[in-house]
Image (cartoon, rainbow, N blue to C red):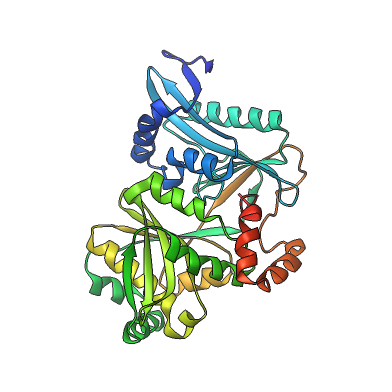
Amino acid sequence: MESTKTVGEAITLHELDRVNYARWDRFVKDAADGTFFHLSGWKEVIERAFGFKVYFFYTERAGQITGVLPLGHVKSVLFGNSLISVPFCVYGGVIAEDDESAMVLRMAACRLADTLGVDALELKNRVPSNQGWPVKELYVTFRKEISQDPEENLKAIPRKQRAMVRKGINAGLASESVDGCDRFFRIYSESVRNLGTPVMPLKYFQLLRAVFGNDCDVLMVTHEGKDIAGVMSFYFRDEVLPYYGGSIPLARNLKGNDFMYWELMRRCGERGIRVFDYGRSKLDAGSYSFKKNWGFSPEPLHYEYYLVNSTAVPEINPNNPKYQLFIKAWQKLPLPVANRIGPFLARKLG
């Protein structure tokens, strides 16, 4: 434990233990900048699924939590050595109720990055910290309020995209919430192989459902009784985040993806969810255009870096030319081979 002096009570720095999970989560859910990816459950998921060392720091004043910063250490020969808030998540960084708590957390992260000798510390902020750190201007997110009325939500979708949704409906597609992850994993693993990306282990998805309970669910889309698409979504306050989604080639002609996201939006609106968070995309990528076509406006994400052994912001993403040969080779792998090897590589991507 460390402390810093302030007027009145001192701020103290701590690492999260199981006893304080509930306190941590209450702070995250009450904080304006809190996100699903700041929740304590990620500590257990990352440790148990991947075996990474995690450091979930929080500050206190007079026995009350004043800030949190979840971090994970990801190290590999292929993808580098990073301290990340938060691995496998699109949002992260410091959330604090005052500048002093934020500074204590940021300084603790920098000291840890120096001690571990990482290439860089990465904070995945939704809002800029204005600390003058290098920033990666590659990603945006898409968030929009939705209505409880399905017709209102459908009318809010631009005409061309609305036509795609109606084609899916007219094709006789159906949706259902399912228990377990096996059906989802079969579809998702094929989808990411086709994109040239290693798949996460099935155990990871099972842990997400087990740890987050009703705040993590799976929606499957079927055609004539056959699974063609699926999405795993997270729920936080009054928001839904469709996070892991995939489909097989058959879904393209049937507009399976369009139907799937519409069904998720319809279901969530009717149950009182008010924000549909379409998630992160790279600027001008296919997913970027897809989300804009739904009438969502891009909001820049502010990924900030404290460089330790690296002289430049790390570029661990498919846009990096050095990964292009790997992506093309991976797309050609038989699915059973990709599913056997993929989890060993995916765990190192962070």
Residue closer to the observer: 224 or 97: 224
121 left or right, relative to 277: right
Q: Position of residue 287 (x, y in %)?
A: 52, 69
Q: Position of residue 28 (x, y in %)?
A: 39, 38
Q: Position of residue 295 (x, y in %)?
A: 40, 71
Q: Position of residue 240 (x, y in %)?
A: 36, 57
Q: Is residue 271 above or below residue 210?
A: below
Q: Is residue 34 above or below residue 9?
A: below
Residue drawn at 47 percent across, 25 percent down: 59
Tell me if I can see residue 147 in this picture. no
Q: Is residue 181 above or below residue 34?
A: below
Q: Is residue 99 above or below residue 192?
A: above
Residue drawn at 73 percent across, 62 percent down: 323
306 left or right, relative to 191: right
177 left or right, relative to 256: left
Residue drawn at 51 percent across, 56 percent down: 202
Instruction: Give the tally of numbered discs.
Output: 0
Tell me if I can see residue 274 in this picture. yes
Residue closer to the observer: 337 or 284: 337
Residue closer to the observer: 95 or 39: 39
